[in-house]
Image (tube, rainbow, N blue to C red):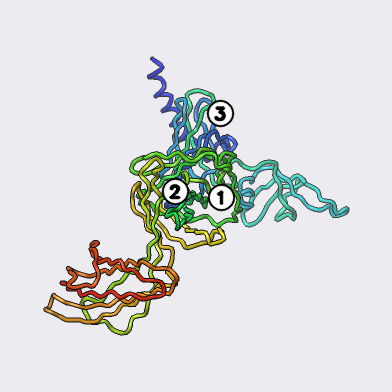
């Protein structure tokens, strides 16, 4: 019979042996983080991470039981993929919760020799007296010095921990090896508790009309386990998921993080590539991401972008009925508008928070406001809403209303703008109008942008300006 035909028969024998001797009953080879040869994390923006964990193990010929610790407690169990080289076949996989407790230790040592630690009645010195644990039914029964003793006083001690107990969750594999030798075990699984987000610093230069944009990636680990010296990939984009996130494991967390020297020096930046409709960033050096840690790394080169400061007043006038009450003045939004570059420095911008800064007359940088941007492709327009203009106010008032028919309505509107500042202000007045509308009359030119009519109004320093218009709407 050829070797090719003999091996399936041997594998069947291994499988039969695994069924006859479950992994829970046999000796298990521990495989902790010290056996790890490579670790890679792909982190998504929705709290999901993909862990690729490679470890080396010594196999004996036949069925082996491996106990792997250091996996994320928030693992999505049915996403687990295991692969072993050298023709080794994984027969079964069993996830076990941490079970190292005093009761479990006592139960595992019934019938075994141990020690009772107590104080000598004469000297008071602590002694370890040999004892055999006989039973835990209804209390502790032990054999001490040739006598059977019920509920003896003292602390029990044993020479070794039972192999079936672990202080942390473990994955136990039963694997059939055709030959003895060293092989690599690859574990790949999804886990909740890994997250990243983009944050931006934008330095605004109003005189030059540009801003300098710096991007950082903030990595968070809330899995309940440390990931040491891991290669990190970040995915920008919205991946779909249907599995429910596992809740975090309550535990005390130490805030710590360590990045390799190349990352700390910011000498290298992540390499970006398009993958399956998303953008993937590969960090150039390994990062140690401790449980509870927050690590910040540079995401892309700094960009200088031409930008425009705008004052924008958004209005939603009453067009299907008479206005009630007297409206209060509002302050227009201060917006910085730009388009992402298309030249050599072109970069898509993953969604995140943008914090805007500007220099005062002394050259000191001051915080001007913050806004959030969505995922922004190359060449797309961006508007940052920094806050509200202090010196400029806008007051809207309906001046006329007429119901022409059951479906047609006409109304007049007056918008009064005041500029209390020392410089002229240009305000974009945007009126979002309902239904099918048309401007019947206006004292200033306007543009139509979808459902909005937009006017540009110049307001002199320390002065006022007025905009009047009439609109017809159909429902």
Q: Residue at x 47, y 51 (%)?
A: 212
Say left or right for 228 vs 464. Answer: right
Residue receiving disc 2: 304
Q: Earlier in the sequence, mark 1 or mark 3?
A: 3
* Relative height, residue 334 to residue 30 (above, below): below
Most foreground residue, 45 or 78: 45
Mark 1 to mark 2 CA distance (whole Å): 36 Å
Q: Residue 307: x percent and y percent?
A: 40, 54
SS assignment at label 3: strand
**Which residue of the protein is positioned furthest toward the left in this rendering?**
405
SS assignment at label 2: strand
Q: Residue 413: x percent and y percent?
A: 25, 77
Mark 1 to mark 3 CA distance (whole Å): 29 Å
Q: Residue 54: x percent and y percent?
A: 51, 35
Q: Residue at x 58, y 42 (%)?
A: 265
* Relative height, residue 123 to residue 409 (above, below): above
Residue receiving disc 1: 291
Q: Residues within 10 Å of mark 1 (few under 14, many from 20)?
A: many
SS assignment at label 1: loop
Residue 229 lies in what quarter of the image? Answer: top right
* Relative height, residue 449 to residue 73 (above, below): below
């Amino acid at each position: 019979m050829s070797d090719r035909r003999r091996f399936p028969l041997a594998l069947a024998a291994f499988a039969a042996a695994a069924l006859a001797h479950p992994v829970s009953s046999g000796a298990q080879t521990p495989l902790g983080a010290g056996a790890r040869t490579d670790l890679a994390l792909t982190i998504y923006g929705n709290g999901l991470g993909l862990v690729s964990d490679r470890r080396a193990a010594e196999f004996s010929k036949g069925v082996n039981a491996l106990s792997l610790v250091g996996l994320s407690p928030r693992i999505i169990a049915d996403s687990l993929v295991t692969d072993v080289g050298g023709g080794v076949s994984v027969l079964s996989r069993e996830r076990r919760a941490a079970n190292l407790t005093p009761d479990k230790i006592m139960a595992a040592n019934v019938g075994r020799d141990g020690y009772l630690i107590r104080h000598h009645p004469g000297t008071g010195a602590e002694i370890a007296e040999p004892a055999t644990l006989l039973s835990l039914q209804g209390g502790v029964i032990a054999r001490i010095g040739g006598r059977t003793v019920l509920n003896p006083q003292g602390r029990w001690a044993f020479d070794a921990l039972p192999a079936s107990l672990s202080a942390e969750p473990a994955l136990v594999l039963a694997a059939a090896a055709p030959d003895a030798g060293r092989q690599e075990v690859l574990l790949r699984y999804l886990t909740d508790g890994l997250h990243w987000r983009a944050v931006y610093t934008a330095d605004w230069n109003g005189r030059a009309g540009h801003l300098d944009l710096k991007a950082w990636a903030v990595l968070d680990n809330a899995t309940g386990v440390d990931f040491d010296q891991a290669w990190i990939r970040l995915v920008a984009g919205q991946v779909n998921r249907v599995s429910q996130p596992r809740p975090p494991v309550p535990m005390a967390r130490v805030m710590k993080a360590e990045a390799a020297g190349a990352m700390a020096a910011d000498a290298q930046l992540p390499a970006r590539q398009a993958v399956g409709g998303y953008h993937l960033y590969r960090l150039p050096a390994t990062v140690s991401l401790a449980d509870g840690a927050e690590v910040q790394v540079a995401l892309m080169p700094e960009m200088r972008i031409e930008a425009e400061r705008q004052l924008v007043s958004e209005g939603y006038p009453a067009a299907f009925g008479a206005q009630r009450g007297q409206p209060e003045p509002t302050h227009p939004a201060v917006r910085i508008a730009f388009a992402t570059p298309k030249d050599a420095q072109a970069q898509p911008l993953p969604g995140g928070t943008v914090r805007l800064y500007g220099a005062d007359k002394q050259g000191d940088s001051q915080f001007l406001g913050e806004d959030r941007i969505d995922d922004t492709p190359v060449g797309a327009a961006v508007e940052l809403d920094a806050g509200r203009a202090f010196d400029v106010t806008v007051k809207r008032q309906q001046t006329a209303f007429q119901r022409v028919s059951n479906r047609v309505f006409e109304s007049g509107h007056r918008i009064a703008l005041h500029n209390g500042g020392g410089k002229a202000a240009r305000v974009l007045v945007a009126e979002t109008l309902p239904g099918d509308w048309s401007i019947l009359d206006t004292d200033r030119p306007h543009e139509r942008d979808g459902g909005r009519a937009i006017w540009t109004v110049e307001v002199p320093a320390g002065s006022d300006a007025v905009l009047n218009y009439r609109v017809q709407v159909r429902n």
